[in-house]
Image (cartoon, rainbow, N blue to C red):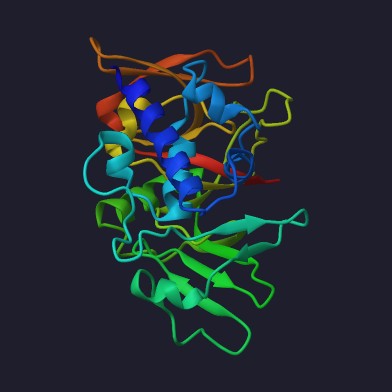
Amino acid sequence: MDTKEFINEQFVRTIETLIENKTVKSKASISRELGLSSNAISEIKGGRNNVGIDVVLKLCDMFDISVEYQLQGKGEMFLNKKTKEPKIYSIDQNLTHVVDEPLSVYNSVFEVDTDFVDDEIEVFTNTNGNRFYVYPNKRIEIEVLKVPFKAYASYIECYQDEMNTINGFESARFAADHIGRGNYICFISEGDSMNGGMLDDTPGGSEILAREVGRQLWDNLHNTKYGLIFVTKTGIMHKDFGGYNEATGMFTLTSRNKAHKPFEYPANDVYQIFNVIKRSF
């Protein structure tokens, strides 16, 4: 069994467990939560399609599931071993995000910013310093560092210092569908290489919310809806992933603007990779 087949099986097994535990109502309901088509899970189970790593990460974030279990089969399925009951989230048509259990359950996982909590807003900070604001109507916003592509040198200096020094960077807020564990950053794009005129393309100057892809997941990179952010030795780039040549150690990076040709870039010169979640322009 190859890696993709294994990840597919783990994904389907987890979905079926969530349904058995009555954490989710059906495959159709969890498909909507994950942004998949109604028959996507059946296609993955039947071997007619593969689950994307971005979907696996979203599933893990939403239901407190172990990424290591999903990708390697190690450890327990759920991180919350005491209850074995993942957290439940639902989204209404107005994109108001509802948390179906008391927010106090996050106190053992996320740091509560008591200086910010008042009678109307609760604020949680994950281990990467991303702050989540939960409003009385249960709408959630995430506050992240805002890094312009042009500020590459300053960002790298902070990154190499484990982001302990973030002076000079502003912050940005985006609507979020759940409180997440990952490392989220807002990048401000430059140029039109990812703007081919299609709905999912990104014009230059856009604010991009992105979630870091752990290095252990780089072997399973693939194209995503809005592309990937590559923080490299020579700059920050927004590109699609065109493949990896194991013999040469080179990534192939592609653009959506036909005026920009695909090119190869050394994988060893890539510091971080982020999956683009949202864009604002």
Quarter of the rendering occupied by the N terminus: top left
Closer-to-camera residue (223/257):
223
Q: Residue furthest right?
A: 94
Q: Residue 238: image x %, image y %? A: 51, 33
Q: Residue furthest front?
A: 20
- Dividing the picture into quadrants, the one containing residue 220 is top left
Q: Residue 144: image x %, image y %? A: 50, 60
Q: In the visual, does 271 lie left or right of 49? A: left
Which residue appears at 74% of the width and 25% of the height? 197
Q: Residue 165: image x %, image y %? A: 33, 64
- Residue 117 appears in the figure: yes
| Residue 93 higher or lower than 241, as above or below | below
Counting every numbered tag in the picture gives 0
Q: Residue 45: image x %, image y %? A: 48, 24
Q: In the visual, does 159 lie left or right of 28? A: left
Closer-to-camera residue (167/121):
121
Which residue appears at 41% of the width and 41% of the height? 14
Q: Residue furthest top?
A: 247
Closer-to-camera residue (233/226):
226
- Residue 233 appears in the figure: no
Which residue appears at 46% of the width and 87% of the height? 115
| Residue 143 higher or lower than 43, as above or below | below
